[in-house]
Image (cartoon, rainbow, N blue to C red):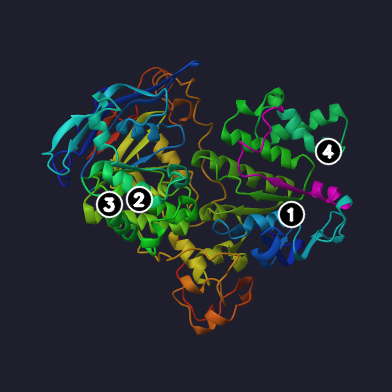
Amino acid sequence: MVQVEETPERKLLEVKNLRKFFPIRRGIMQKEVGAVRAVDDVSFFINEGETLGLVGESGCGKTTTSRCILRAVSPTSGEIIYRTEDGETVDVVTMPRAQLRGLRRDMQLIFQDPFSSLNPRMTLMDIVGEPLLVHGLGNKKEREERVAELLSLVGLRPEYMRRFPHAFSGGQRQRIGIARALATHPRLIVADEPVSALDVSVQAQVLNLLLDLQRDLGLTYLFVAHDLSVVRHISDRVAVMYVGKIVELAPTDELFANPKHPYTAALLSAVPEPDPRRRSNRVVLQGEVANPADPPSGCYFHPRCEHATDVCRVEAPSLVEVEPNHYVSCHHAKELRLAGVAVND
Amino acid sequence: MQPTPMVNKQRSDEPLLSVKNLHTHFPLDEGTVVAVDGASFELYAGQTLGIVGESGCGKSVAARSILGILDKPGIVVDGEIHFRRTQDNEAGESIDLAGQDPNGEVVRSIRGGEISYIFQEPMTSFSPVHTVGNQIIEAIRLHRDVSKSEARTIAVEMLGLVGIPSPETRVDEYAFQLSGGLRQRAMIAMSLSCNPTLLIADEPTTALDVTTQAQILDLLRRLQDEYNMAIMMITHDLGVIAEMADHVVVMYLGQVVESAPVDDIFHNPKHPYTKALLESIPRMDGVRQEKLASITGSVPHPYDRPTGCPYNPRCEAFIEGVCNTKMPELSLVGENHQVSCFLYKGA
């Protein structure tokens, strides 16, 4: 948790009104009959050197959002403003493909599954060195030196360079993936569920490594995950998504202690606490996540919300700042008193 | 290794299931994988036993050994699995499942009937070419003497019981038409349709989102109260264990390293591995720590088991010449609390 409160905050990335709809096509003419609104009007920013956690249940659009930022998929509309190293701001959405390659040196991705994201036929040298090759950085000897440096940075022995991924455990493979992501000296790392495939004892090692790297290299993270306790540990601020929209965004401790959106509160109370003395009388959400191809009217959460009133059924709320840095998208955010988790134990 | 018998006054005098010194091996061309290496545990009617451990610790293999559904070439080479048959007219006689033919009549009548199994991934455990209802009806008719239409009525009833909306139409749907949560509910409906006395739930909520997980855990607890079932809950999630279990068994590399009531596991853990596991999970409450405690290294490869205590290469309390030469035994350190570690006398 590197906090940058004292220094003037500089936005590294700003996402404005991002939308990504996937068309649903039917029939012989492949006529468009509808759209899956995977990401629907999402706006947020990330300051330099901070970690923004993006949480939500499967299908809420968190992965699509992160893919749009890297332009692995092209957004339907919206702006993604990125500030490059020399201080210029560029819009990733409208950038011509030819220029994207340079930008991608700056933004890298860490994948979820360390077993399928490493090519089994390539050695660590080839895997970790590939971004350098793609971007034409250094000759063979320089690349080898850089790979050795990267491997020791993530806690692997440089001698392993000639080995293949099958010789490594899940945690070690995830370290290889991290080394590859760091190869081109990126400033923004998008980590999509980087620890969800790992066992708890190894998960802690990888989380510690990510925090160390952030401190030493000044990295900025967009950390996508569904595990709230992991997100709480690593993030400075957290955004909660539900059916393609951000419903709440706040500094981590504030969000966990003082949630303002009923969905956030329900998510927090659904996490089983590792303490049998506190078997909770929790709020169990009824029903299922709304279908993003056919969302309900008004607030998407209203069919499952115990606080829903008439206005929730007709009018969609917008994300407003109810307290400094605390954004909520709920008609009743001001009057609701919701339970969070205890901060002082 | 002789397990010390557990004494508990609150529980019914005789365990429903008692596994003693179970050894399950997978003889492969490259060598034998010792998946379960002398595990012992007991389970009482109406109680939940949590089995916790990291991947590869043998928790699923131990459970599959009970039902004789090991993947090839797995084989139970030693040990006893005593199961007390109390369903229907069985007068509580105890049989040793380890000595039975896994495809024989006795095991087939127990499997899916008195003992049911919930798998981790409900998508792959339902057939994609039969409706969910037909699969449940098949299971009911295998174990209960009812007609097809009676079985269908029971199936609809069970689907309703586990909270599937409009069960009379859902019964004719295929697994792929149901969401993950509904599919897991259908799986539970199927496993409960023959009134099992023991339900083995192997990571039943791992593939689900937290809000769905909360629904499923609630459902399991409610059904347990209603039917006085025993549940064997296998998971790597300590939160789920804390929420559900009465008694907890911690496994590492095929061995039981600690076995204790749930409160002792979380508030008075003894084994260094249990302690380290608890410290390495990020917490939802309290002040956030700068660094998480982590366990160095990773679970050894099964071909490459350390000598002595299986945990010794990663242990902080490692004693040279003791831990790496001798195998500790499970011994009693408190009421119902057993630990397998040289730090505690008697091991």
| Residue carrying label 1 | A73
Labels 2, 1: front one:
2
Q: Closest to the observer: A40 or A344?
A: A40
Q: Secondary structure at mark 3?
A: helix
Magenta segment range? Answer: A99-123
Q: Is residue A120 magenta?
A: yes
On screen, residue A33 versus residue A283, left or right, reads right
Measured Cα–Cα span from mark 2 to mark 3? 16 Å
Labels 1, 4: front one:
1
Q: Amino acid at mark 1?
A: Val
Q: Is residue A9 magenta?
A: no
Residue B213 occupies quadrant: bottom left
| Residue carrying label 4 | A134
Q: Secondary structure at mark 4?
A: helix
Identify the subunit bearing mark 3.
Answer: B
Which of the two labelled residues, at mark 2 and mark 3, occupies the earlier sequence position? 3
Q: Secondary structure at mark 1?
A: loop
Q: Secondary structure at mark 2?
A: helix
